[in-house]
Image (spheres, rainbow, N blue to C red):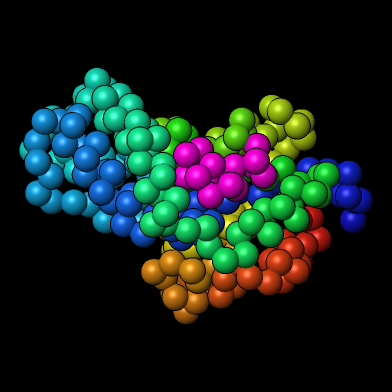
Amino acid sequence: MADRRDEHRLVLWDIDHTLIETRGVGKRLYVAAFETATGRDMTDAVEPTGRTELAIFGETLERHGIEPSDELRRQYAAELARQYEEHADELRTVGRALPGARAVLAALAEQAMVVQTVLTGNLRAVAATKLRVFGLDEYVDWAVGAYGEDASERAELVAIGQERAANKYGGNFNRDNTVIIGDTAQDVNAAHEGGARIIAVASGRDTADDLQRAGADTVLPDLLETACVLSSLTDSPEI
Ligand SMILES: [Mg+2]
């Protein structure tokens, strides 16, 4: 087997319910941004778990009989980013970083050959606010992440992150040297369809059994045992 110790490995973090929880703040800001962008009351909210911002907004428009347009998407995206900035203090007070998240991020940031970033349905600006508010933003390479405005299907984000990482760090990122860490069956599916391994963390709505059934390579109860998370990452010969 080739010696891969000198090759980069790519770690793609999901954000909501994996690294942080907004505890209801995110839902309120989604409603506020929708109402400001469209001038309409939101009467039928979409279940956002595991989905991308484009998909959530598109379905919300549809449920309200509003014709989608690029202009409307731009207005909504700008308003949502603005709402998160305006309510950053509320997010910090009400929400939380999940136990163990900082320690794992910090430990991985110490590993020279690990490229650590996010793969998230959040807009990039919102993702940045969410992690900054909880002091987690310094550990990830924002330039190579994949975000909610990059594609409407989560699985498509995998190749986007891999390509950005390859452009910056060289080499080739694929299923053998890329791992997603996420909390939902959608994260598991995105890894399978997009070309990555998946460590699932049962810190969100999906139980360990759900995640196992979805086909996660590894399921952890939480991020509390840093050593355990790191050893899950290194279980495969390449990661
Ligand atoms: Mg999540």
- Image spot of residue 234 (x, y percent): 77, 62
Considering every residue shown, the one lying at the far bottom of the view is 209
Question: Closer to the camera, 239 or 97?
Answer: 97
Q: Is 135 colored magenta in this rendering?
A: yes
Q: Quadrant of the C terminus?
A: bottom right
Q: Is residue 111 visible?
A: yes
Question: Closer to the camera, 38 or 26?
Answer: 26
Task: Decide whether the magenta segment is chiefly helix, strand or loop.
Answer: helix
Q: Residue at x 63, y 70 (%)?
A: 224
Is residue 23 depicted above or below 139 in this figure? below
Q: Is residue 105 left or right of residue 214?
A: right
- Image spot of residue 147 (x, y percent): 47, 38
Question: Closer to the camera, 53 or 192?
Answer: 53
- Image spot of residue 212 (x, y percent): 51, 74
Is residue 1 depicted above or below 171 in this figure? below
- Image spot of residue 193 (x, y percent): 50, 52
Q: Quadrant of residue 160?
A: top right
Q: Residue at x 56, y 75 (%)?
A: 221
Magenta segment: 128-141
Q: Quadrant of the N terminus?
A: bottom right
Q: Is residue 36 left or right of residue 227?
A: left
Q: Is 239 colored magenta in this rendering?
A: no
Question: Closer to the camera, 136 or 65?
Answer: 136
Q: Residue at x 88, y 50 (%)?
A: 5
